[in-house]
Every structure is written in C-alpha cells, then in structure tokens.
Amino acid sequence: MYRTNTCGELRLSDAGKKVTLAGWVQRSRKMGGMTFVDLRDRYGITQLVFNEEADAELCALANKLGREYCIQVEGTVNERQSKNNKIPTGDIEIIADKLYILSQSATPPFTIEDNTDGGDDIRMKYRYLDLRRPCVRHNLELRHRMTILIRNFLDSKDFIEVETPILIGSTPEGARDFVVPSRMNPGQFYALPQSPQTLKQLLMVSGFDRYFQIAKCFRDEDLRADRQPEFTQIDCEMSFVDQDDVIDLFEDMARHLFKEVRGVELPAKLQQMTWHEAMRRFGSDKPDLRFGMEFVELMDELKGTGEFAVFNDAEYIGGICAPGCASYTRKQLDQLADFVKKPQVGAKGLVWIKVNEDGTTKSSIDKFYTPEVFAKVVEKAEAKPGDLILILSGDKANKTRTQLCSLRLEMADRLGLKDKNKFECLWIVDFPLFEWSDEEQRLMATHHPFTMPNPDDIPLLDEHPERVRAKAYDFVCNGIEVGGGSLRIHDGQLQEKMFKILGFTPERAMAQFGFLINAFKYGAPPHAGLAFGLDRFVSIMAGLDSIRDCIAFPKNNSGRDVMLEAPSELDDKQLKELQISVDVNQENAE
C-alpha cells in the first residue's frame, strides 16, 4: 500500500500507530540533528521527523528532499512537543523509520502556498502546480460539493439528467459560435453549443417533462472576469409550468445551496423587480443591493433652473449620494471625472455637489445655479452633511443610467461596500422581448427567438414590438446575473410571427430551425426553463473576483490556454484533410 492514511486525518488519538503516508514535500528544515519535513496531500499537512541519532542514513536522505518531491514515508504517530494550532494535524507528528523518493521535482516556478509569489500568467502556465495550492483546491472541492447538491436536489424533484450533443448546427442569433470543420462533409461545419436550448425544448416535446444537465457551453465573445469561452451551465427545462412554478422551484434550490454551503438563510420569498424599475433605480438589469446609493432623478431640479447648457439640453439628469465623501480632495474628484470619461463608461463629464457640515453646498457648477436650487437637489437626494452628490447627464436616458451604474459600482469599491459575506438575491422580470441592434440595424431577441411574449402584450407585436414584455426572468445575486430563463413559445403560429419580426424569411427560419418547427406540429406542451451559470454560482459562494479561480483549467483574458498553448496552428496535412486552404498558416504568420 502506498498509504494507510492521508496527511489530513491523523489525530492525537492515533498516537503509537504505525502508518504509511504519501504526498509532496511542502517544506523541510534542519534543526541540529533533527530534520522536519511538512508532507502535503489533497487532505492536509502532516509533519515528519527524521532523527540523525536514530538513523543517520535515513536523515541524510531526508536532507536531500527538495520542495515538491513526491515521497512515501513509514513511521509512528507521536504527540508533538511544540503543537501547531493552525492545522488540524498540529497535535501530532510522524517519527519516520522509512523513506522512499517516488519522484524528484525541479524547483517550482512559484511557491505552492496560499499567498504565493507567482503572478497570474505563470500560475496559468503551470496550472497543475497551482492546483496543489490549498486555496485553489478548496474552490474545486466547493464546486464538486455544489454539483452534488444540485444533482440530488433536482433528482428529488423528478428531473432526469440527459446529455445533449456537443457537435450541433450553427445558429447566428446571439453570441458568436465556435465552429468545427467536418472532414467527412467538406466545406460544412458543426458548431459548439452556446446552450442546449433547442435540444432541451425537443426533450419537452418528447415527454421528458423535467430535464437537467450540467452542460458545457461555448461562446466566442470578448472575455472578462465572469466570462470564459467555455463554461458550465446548470441547464433545466420543465413542461406544464408557468413562470411562478419555475421561479419558486429554483428559488428553493438557491435557498438550499446557500444554507448547505454557506450556512446562509435566504428570505422565505425573494424580491422580484421589473426590468424597467431596475434600470430606473440602478441603471442595470443586475443591480447590486448590498449597498444603497440608489439613483435620484434630478430633471425637475436642474433642467431649465440655471444657466448650465449641458443640463438644459439633457434628456436625463441623475445622481447618486456617496455617504461621507464630501471630504474628497480635488485630486480624488478629478480621478472620478477621469473614470466616467473612460471609453468603457463613455460619459462626457461629471458634476459634483459637496454638502458641508453646516448644510451649505459647494459644487463644480456653483456659478450656474443659486443656493436654493442646490438645496432642492440635496433634499431630493436625501443627502446629509458630509455627503457627496455625483451627477451625470445625457441625451439618452438608459445610456446615461448605465454610465451612472458604473460610477455607483466604482464608489462602492472605493468605500468597501461589496461585502463578500453578504448575499442579496432577487429576480428581475418583465424584460423587453426585443432590443434594437445598432450593428444589425434591426430588432433582436433580448434572450432568444423562442421566448414567450407576455400574453397581455401580444396585440402589440404587429405595430409596437419594441413595447412587448417577455415572460423572462433572471436570478441576480450581488450584482451578478447567476441564471436566467423564460417561458417558451409552443404555438407554431406565434413562433412564425416571432421569426418574422426578427427578420427571418420563412425559408431561412425553416433552414435554421425546421427541426423545432416540425416538432411543434406534434403536440408541444407548454414549457419553460432556466439555466444557472455554475462557474458564477461557485465564485459567489467562494467569494472570488473571477470565475477562473473555480475552473480547473481556465483560459486567460485573450481566450488562450497558456499551459496547452491553445489555440494553435494546424499542420498542412490536417488542413488539406479538412479541405481548408493551406495558406491560412502563412497568412497568420504574416
């Protein structure tokens, strides 16, 4: 046997027991005639003791051990004289009498510690070493535990897990597809699924009334902290349900996960907020409710009440009240102004009003307004002495609200208001069914073409489709969209109308979605679904800033796997087999 016990399980009650351990050398230190080695495996750390007086040859071998050597040791469990209360095995040590070096190790490029000296790039290149660090390993253990809890919960609710294909047809709606050339069908391509959307709807037609899958999904889109080119969804679909049924069930699942994983009791019923209300109050369809600074609309107070042309020409003027920030220096205020002017935010400028301790005000636009106007702004914002009011304006209301949302989140970061141990969850409902695409110059489906319109708004589809609400819902936690779904269209005529509004000809709709259209001719049940982002859910539970830290082998911000050096070029032989021009490699090189 390579081991009788792990490095995390032995306790004082095991004193005197003969054991065999195996693992990696965390560190070693020589003190006089004694050599101490910390042995680490997935389960913990145990201290080994080699005594030169007892066995000089064995101690000499121990002195040759380097960091991350893989070793096996036999010995006796002994009570430590100098105990370590920072680790569970800190009361004991192993008095070694045999040592075997299973595999030597080169010097690691960074320390295998929680507080490592390795930067992101080097740790991603040597990810297999990074995974040895306890803090990274704990994230994957948490992911495993959550996955088991999810599977068991859904199984208890009569869901059946079904695997759907990874090689499917391309659907241009939504994000960009990753495509895979077919050698046996030259000039034709598979796509990797952005989600199993149409396939799970077909399962509903098939009579599998409750489906789920821990599904791999792929989207060729720009990356950020909560995005990866491949990610994992908790993908679900249900038949014979309405919106409340879906929300109630998956709210229960979220409540179960928070209680089991974090010991947090979510409210008996989560808040529901309409999309329009969320945009009006927070400028976002995923508002972070852990802190205040709710938007204050200031059109009545500032438009046409002074000589400031920027406000007088604005369609929207709104602000936030930053508590206790009237002490901000000019340098700090200039930094905020520079922040809102960044291309990612896109505002043209920032106006500020300080509320002094005596209740008077000082503003960047003092010369344009009377003190009485500023007093009305202070009253509207419910600002107190010592607070700072930050104001943005623009000619498009929702665009300006989005900019103000960025400023709100920036101030929350500066003020330390994003408590990772506090969880504020809610549902966003009543999304617009369509959104205008400047790139496509047409209406696009806000979620996807199969989303059910609100029945009350169906008469608006012909003349005012932009005003139609969707029977869609998003689950939001701490300002992150963790999951979302919708009721699906199961009526063929309504689906045809949806395709027509989206600019599909009947021929194109049939070419792309004919399999679904035809399936709906055979008694499609009313159905609805939802998908949670597993990576995002785990990262919230673990208090992480990026989903990369809960994925075993993630890509970097350029979509590259720097460990596997992927993506990479194909050799000419592979390209010829796929009937792809062999000039591609040369063009890339140029």
Image (cartoon, grey):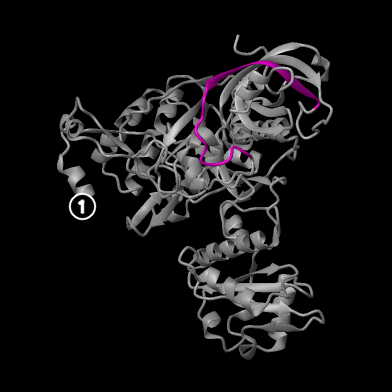
Q: Please tell me which residue lies in front, 557 or 7.
A: 7
Task: State whether residue 403 is above or below residue 48.
Answer: below
Callout 1: 10 Å neighbours few (<14), some, many (20+)? few
Task: State whether residue 372 is above or below residue 29.
Answer: below
Residue displayed at 20% across by 52% down: 590
Residue 297 image offset from top left, x and y in percent? 63, 70
Residue 536 image offset from top left, x and y in percent? 56, 40
**Residues drawn in magenta:** 91-113
Q: Is residue 553 visible?
A: yes
Secondary element under disc 1, as helix, strand or loop, is: loop
Q: Indicate the quadrant where residue 303 lies.
A: bottom right
Q: Please tell me which residue lies in front, 400 or 563.
A: 563
Q: Is residue 452 visible?
A: no
Horizontal side of 578 relative to 341 (left or right) equals left
Residue 399 image offset from top left, x and y in percent? 49, 65
Q: Please tell me which residue lies in front, 484 or 340.
A: 340
Q: Indicate the quadrant where residue 523 lies.
A: top left
Magenta region includes residue 95: yes
**Total of numbered circles in the picture?**
1
Q: Please tell me which residue lies in front, 450 or 48.
A: 48
Residue displayed at 65% across by 39% down: 541
Task: State whether residue 21 is above or below residue 33.
Answer: above
Residue 292 image offset from top left, x and y in percent? 71, 59
Horizontal side of 144 relative to 269 (left or right) equals left
Residue displayed at 56% across by 37% down: 550
Residue displayed at 53% across by 34% down: 129
Residue extending farthest to the top is 1
Magenta region includes residue 74: no
Task: Indicate the amino acid at tag 1.
Answer: Glu
Mark 1 lies on residue: 590
